Amino acid sequence: MSEILQYIPGTSPLHHLNPVTKLLLVILIVGLCVMSAQVPFLCFLIGVLVLGALFSGLIKEIINQVPFLILLSFFLVILTSLTVQEGDLLLTILPSAEPGVQGYGITLGGLLFGVILSLRFIVMITAFQLFVVTTKPSDLVTGLLAFRLPVDYVLMLLIALRFIPSLQLEARRIHEAQLCRGYNPGTGISGKIRSMKPIMIPLVANSLAKTQVLGLTLDMRGYRARKNLPLHKLVFGFGDVISAVLVVIILAAFAYLHVFNA
């Protein structure tokens, strides 16, 4: 099982993009998907991200997230369908006692809102994942510092990103250790739920111990005294020009669907 949100070395055009360019692209895509309520435009953004994954040789990483995205979309659609009562009633759950009054159930507006919300989350998760797995940690720090972010916040973000794959590997080791000791939580959903307890308790305990060691390590290496040292310079290339053209295409599609066809 590959680590999630971990940098994957490569020589693709997306890997060679300037980290500032990639960060601006992520901000633009996430911002437009939040502002948009058009299903065609959100599907267009997903298509752009899938093409980027294909050109970068990372389509396998996107495919591995499909079961999680389907599960997330399913719960979002169910939640919004049961809570948003707008539009025509598609399925009646509780009929109304008053004649001529729409009862409670799944409505067209709630279902459409759930689909839009699911597409937004797919765009945001995919864009952020492509950005992280194609950007070196050193380049990520340089790109964030180019936006004048405080060094402490940049360090916290980098440590948080690194902790995610570390927790994944630690949870897998604990699960394998429990299986070697003969622990059998059973099969199905109930078995998976029961197997979480003997994993979560040692996982949380080990994580707290690692944070203490990490803090002591930073102090011993003189982080406070060296945090203002300059990093390597940012270089913009031909790929960044292509990215600027892509930005124009995305903005043109957004304007066409939301301004001219409004």
Image (cartoon, rainbow, N blue to C red):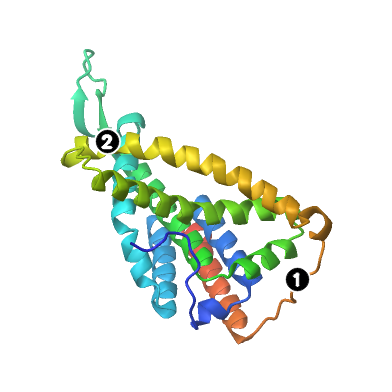
Using a 10 Å C-alpha cutoff, classify the residue at mark 1 as few (fewer than 14 neighbours), some (14 to 19) or many (20 or more).
few
> Tag 2, which secondary structure?
helix
Q: Which residue does the numbered mark 2 point to in the structure image?
A: 193
Q: Of label 2 and label 1, which has the lower sequence position?
A: 2
CA separation, marks 2 and 1? 46 Å
The amino acid type of the residue labelled 2 equals Ile
Q: Quadrant of residue 104?
A: top left
Report helix, strand or loop for mark 1.
loop
| Residue 232 drawn at (x, y percent) | 74, 75
Nearer to me, 108 or 81: 81
Residue at left offset 34%, top offset 53%: 69
Q: In this image, 143 relative to 96: left or right?
A: right
List the single residue furthest toward the top: 97
Which residue is pictured at 47% across the width and 38% down the height? Answer: 204
Identify the disc placed on residue 133: none
Residue displayed at 42% across by 38% down: 202
Q: Do the numbered discs 2 and 1 sit on residues whose CB atoms are within 8 Å?
A: no
In front here: 100 or 134?
A: 134
Q: Is residue 35 above or below residue 46?
A: above
User: Few, some or many C-alpha atoms within 10 Å of disc 2 (few <14, some 14-19, many ≥20)?
Assistant: few
Q: Is residue 90 left or right of residue 139?
A: left
The N terminus lies in quadrant: bottom left
Q: Position of residue 24 (x, y in %)?
A: 62, 65
Q: Does residue 109 appear anywhere in the picture?
A: no
Query: In the image shown, does 244 or 172 lie closer to the viewer?
Result: 172
* Residue 35 coordinates in the image, percent (x, y): 53, 51
User: In the displayed image of the protein, which residue is found farthest to the left?
Assistant: 187
Pointer 1 residue: 231
Give the image quarter of residue 139. Answer: bottom right
Query: Which amino acid does the dot numbered 1 rest on?
Result: Leu
